[in-house]
Amino acid sequence: MKIIMLGAPGAGKGTQAKLIAAKYNIPHISTGDIFRANIKTGTPLGIKAKEFIDKGLLVPDELTLDLIKDRFLGADCINGYVLDGFPRTLPQAEALAASLAESGEKIDYAINVDVPDENIVNRMSGRRACLKCGGTFHIKYNPPVKEGICDLCGGTLMQREDDKPETVARRLEVYHEQTQPLIDYYKENGVLKTVDGTQDVDKVFSDIVDILG
Ligand code: AP5
Ligand code: MG
């Protein structure tokens, strides 16, 4: 099963993608997590990506496409994957469709986690992320058992650099300009499903399971 998560920054794509990956036994592939891991270890890709991410801008398509094509070669992708944060532009979506078409494949579902902008800033300011395993929590809506410590791996939870309110505002603008058009793109492809992302985490997930079966 090949799934794409669509939605604004902070809509809950990562939160839901992790639950989907665990239930359907497919890898969760987050381009944002891959960039952050590269930034942390100071790779050439990480150094380039950081310039854009810290400003709330998208990393250029060329860099992102090289990274994702490489990730798709992983043996764990044989039964599909859940993509979180990719594609994010029409050229990325078209490149993905073209590369799948080469082997007669296609995306099965594009799940749009719908959350209005008003709710987003709240979510971002309370988000805490584990830099070690990518686990995501919220101080109020989804708190870890022990404050500041990741439930999943025991790592330290941090606030993301790009979760400052002014950067969040820029990310939302970029989302509306460059990523939102993908909703129509996947609607035309007949694979779009929308869920109400303002509900609590478990309810959003059960709506997604109803769609995926
Ligand atoms: P990325 O890491 O993908 O960031 P994003 O799209 O901005 O999304 P977020 O990770 O911020 O939000 P999310 O939807 O995953 O929400 P989450 O589940 O954490 O990308 C970062 C940057 O990398 C981009 O800005 C760009 O520069 C670059 N990049 C990445 N991919 C790229 C690409 N393809 N092309 C070019 N550049 C790219 O939830 C948010 C918070 O809300 C959490 O605290 C969570 O606990 C809480 N929460 C979740 N669900 C609920 C709920 N139902 N109710 C209450 N709280 C909830
Ligand atoms: Mg995320």
Image (tube, rainbow, N blue to C red):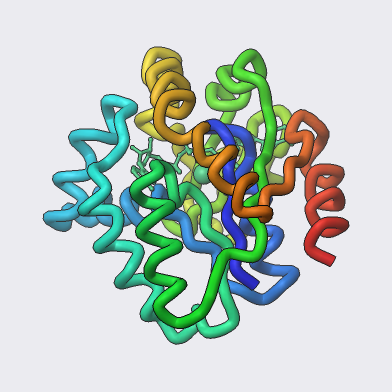
Asked if residue 94 can be seen in this view, the reply is yes
Which residue is outermost to the left? 44
Indicate the position of residue 57 as horizontal and vertical percent values.
Answer: 30, 30
Locate residue 6: give its quadrant.
top right
Residue at (54%, 44%) from the top-left corner?
185
Left or right? Give the position of 56 relative to 107: left
Locate residue 162: give its quadrant.
top left
Q: In which quarter of the image is the C terminus?
A: bottom right
Which residue is outermost to the front? 188
Q: Quadrant of the N terminus?
A: bottom right
Residue at (40%, 44%) from the top-left corner?
90
Q: Is residue 80 above or below residue 211?
A: below
Indicate the position of residue 78 as horizontal and vertical percent values.
Answer: 52, 84
- Looking at the image, which is closer to me, 194 or 160? 194
Residue at (23%, 34%) from the top-left corner?
52
Asked if residue 131 can be seen in this view, the reply is no
Indicate the position of residue 203 as horizontal and vertical percent values.
Answer: 86, 43
Q: Is residue 164 above or below residue 2?
A: above
Q: Is residue 15 above or below residue 69?
A: above
Residue at (54%, 22%) from the top-left corner?
125
Left or right? Give the position of 212 relative to 41: right
